[in-house]
Image: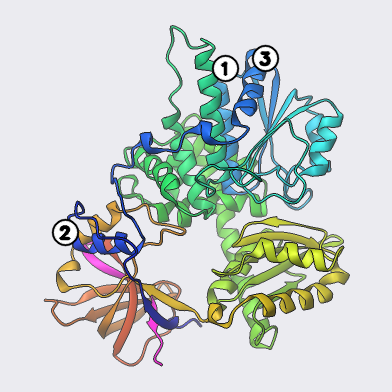
């Protein structure tokens, strides 16, 4: 059973002067809270940071151009998540448009080979006899795999966005906004975004070489549907540059200009293309792509994204949907087991959670860790047993840099961690089974040292109360136009006092409400997803997002209830 999540309330304060050119007062307030001093709702591509600002991008592009013009074999080595899949599909589609005659891809099997361009994956790559290996969304920590390729005389270009270790791989060129000395203004690019930038540079060098004289230059904007999907699905911060990439990709999807694979995913997810939002990419399309890499092999996801027709794409989208249903069932069972462990005393009073179970699938532990982090507001690591190793996935809370913490732990206890990598908010690691106890003790001790008590106090961060006139389609439309909303550019969240006049559980797992509020003519519809307990008392201080329920004619506002305010 899951009740309404209750937290203390904190209201956002203005971080910049309200923008006079924004007509809607609620949107003006929301943008002011997010520190926006300048805003162009058109999100023009001309405002993108220039590709030439990335270090090593010109020599990296030159290697790709050489391979294209000489008809060399290019092998794209991707990752098994949605970012890696979209980046791989983007690389193949654009390289072929740019004239590459021999281009193929290779993605590791999560269970057999694990993450990245490992030494074992390098051996598989060598069987393809490539002249150039081009990574996407991995490679910055692939020291052994890249060393093996270089030993065999293969040229290697790394495109990645993960944080590097102390030693960089011996690649011929590295394009990564997070590598040492990089001055690129957006460190938040996803793997697919980094690949997009490299391909922009490749196209420009081909233009400069006269390759497209007398014929049309390939239009890179038509591939922004892939960039948008991978960027949102990877939960990277939606800074100003990423918001342009995502919004431009969404506009293509809304206009019916998405590639067949993405159209098929929109269709199977039951979404209306013209009403598509960034959250649909994160919660509907992305999980269906990710499911293939979690439980099967990402080949299916990439094949769907590369399909040329709807007739090819639909069966693949249906297959991805079925895999995702299996993932959902497996995830629910694993989460329930993890919550039972904590209820029984596992890490119940610790500043972090570190759990393992032989029944957990390694493709699911990241979702388990994420769910535990959200529910208990503590950093969480979930380990799955994989042969003679434990493979862990970790998620963090704001203010606790996960990868830096693992690096510090590794320095203090050499050999305890076999491998690790990731970001501030998410990381992966591998340890030996016998090391679980020592690792857990060392990790919890480190968390005791580094996590300030106030960071463990979960709060709702609200954009404030709404006047009665704001519960209207016009305000909802204005807020949607202020997006795309997502990671580090959070969707507007409001709070207010309501009287519950009706409530019932629908679909076995969601709380449907009818609410009354002073100043409103009639009741409001509301729903709290994942809540299967009724609320008491009738008067409730709720936090919510504004949405439009288009099942009615005309559509009318409804509240997506995120939780309740805890009483001090």
Q: Earlier in the sequence, mark 2 or mark 1?
A: 1
For the residues bearing labels 3 and 2, Cβ distance under 8 angstroms:
no
Q: Earlier in the sequence, mark 3 or mark 2?
A: 3
In this rendering, would 355 be left or right of 201? right
Q: Residue at x 63, y 32 (%)?
A: 56
On residue 554, which mark appears? 2
174 vs 17: above or below: above
Can you give x and y, in whole percent of width and height, for residue 248 in the image?
37, 40
Q: Is residue 404 magenta?
A: no
For the residues bearing labels 1 and 3, Cβ distance under 8 angstroms:
no
Q: Is residue 546 visible?
A: yes
Badge 3 density bin: few <14, some 14–19, many ≥20, Cα 10 Å: some
Q: Residue at x 68, y 62 (%)?
A: 404
Q: Nearer the viewer, mark 3 or mark 2?
A: 3
For label 3, the residue is 71
For the residues bearing labels 2 and 1, Cβ distance under 8 angstroms:
no
Q: Residue at x 19, y 51 (%)?
A: 21
- State the image quarter where residue 382 is shown: bottom right
Badge 2 density bin: few <14, some 14–19, many ≥20, Cα 10 Å: few
Q: Is residue 196 visible?
A: no
462 vs 67: above or below: below
For label 1, the residue is 99
**Magenta residues?**
550-568
> What is the spatial separation of the Cα atoms under label 3 and label 2, in whole angstroms?
58 Å
Can you give x and y, in whole percent of width and height, for residue 303 in the image?
58, 36
Q: Earlier in the sequence, mark 1 or mark 3?
A: 3
């Amino acid at each position: 059973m899951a009740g309404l999540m209750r937290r203390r309330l904190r209201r956002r304060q203005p971080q910049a002067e309200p923008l006079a050119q924004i007509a809607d007062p609620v949107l003006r307030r929301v943008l002011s809270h997010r520190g926006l001093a300048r805003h162009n709702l058109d999100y023009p591509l001309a405002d993108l940071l220039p590709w030439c600002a990335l270090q090593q991008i010109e020599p990296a592009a030159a290697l790709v151009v050489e391979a294209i013009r000489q008809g060399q074999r290019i092998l794209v080595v991707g990752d098994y998540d949605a970012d890696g899949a979209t980046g791989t599909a983007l690389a193949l589609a654009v390289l072929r448009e740019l004239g590459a005659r021999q281009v193929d891809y290779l993605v590791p099997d999560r269970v057999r080979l694990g993450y990245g361009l490992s030494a074992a994956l390098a051996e598989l790559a060598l069987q393809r006899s490539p002249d150039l290996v081009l990574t996407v969304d991995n490679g910055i920590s692939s020291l052994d795999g890249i060393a093996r390729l270089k030993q065999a005389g293969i040229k290697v270009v790394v495109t990645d966005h993960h944080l590097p270790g102390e030693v960089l791989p011996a690649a011929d060129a590295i394009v990564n906004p997070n590598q040492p000395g990089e001055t690129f203004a957006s460190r938040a690019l996803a793997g697919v975004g980094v690949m997009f930038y490299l391909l922009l540079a490749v196209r420009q060098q081909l233009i400069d070489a006269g390759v497209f004289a007398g014929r049309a230059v390939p239009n890179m904007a038509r591939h922004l549907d892939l960039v948008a999907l991978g960027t949102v699905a990877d939960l990277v911060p939606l800074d100003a540059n990423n918001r342009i990439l995502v919004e431009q990709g969404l506009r293509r999807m809304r206009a019916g200009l998405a590639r067949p694979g993405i159209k098929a995913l929109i269709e199977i997810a039951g979404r209306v293309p013209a009403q598509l939002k960034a959250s649909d990419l994160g919660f509907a399309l992305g999980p269906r792509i990710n499911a293939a890499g979690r439980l099967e092999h990402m080949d299916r996801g990439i094949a769907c994204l590369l399909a040329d027709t709807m007739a090819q794409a639909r069966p693949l989208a249906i297959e991805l949907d079925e895999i995702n249903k299996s993932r959902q069932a497996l995830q629910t069972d694993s989460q329930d087991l993890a919550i039972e462990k904590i209820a029984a005393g596992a890490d119940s009073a610790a500043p972090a959670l570190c759990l393992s179970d032989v029944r957990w699938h390694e493709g699911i532990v990241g979702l388990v860790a994420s769910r535990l982090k959200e529910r208990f507001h503590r950093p969480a690591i979930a380990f799955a047993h994989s042969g003679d190793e434990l493979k862990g996935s970790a998620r963090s809370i704001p203010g606790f840099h996960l990868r830096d913490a693992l690096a510090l732990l590794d320095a203090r206890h050499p050999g305890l961690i076999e491998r690790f990598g990731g970001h501030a908010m998410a990381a992966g690691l591998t340890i030996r089974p016998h090391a679980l106890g020592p690792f857990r003790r060392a990790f919890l001790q480190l968390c005791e040292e580094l996590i300030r008590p106030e960071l463990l106090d979960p709060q709702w961060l609200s954009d404030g109360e709404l006047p009665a006139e704001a519960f209207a389609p016009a305000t909802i439309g204005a807020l949607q136009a202020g997006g795309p909303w997502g990671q580090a550019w959070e969707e507007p969240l409001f709070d207010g006092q309501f009287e519950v006049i009706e409530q019932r559980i629908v679909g076995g797992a969601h709380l449907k409400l009818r609410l009354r509020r002073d100043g409103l003519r009639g009741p409001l519809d509301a729903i709290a997803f994942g809540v299967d307990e009724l609320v008491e008392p009738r008067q409730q201080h709720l936090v919510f997002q504004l949405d439009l329920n288009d099942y009615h004619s005309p559509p009318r506002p409804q509240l997506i209830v995120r939780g309740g305010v805890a009483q001090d």
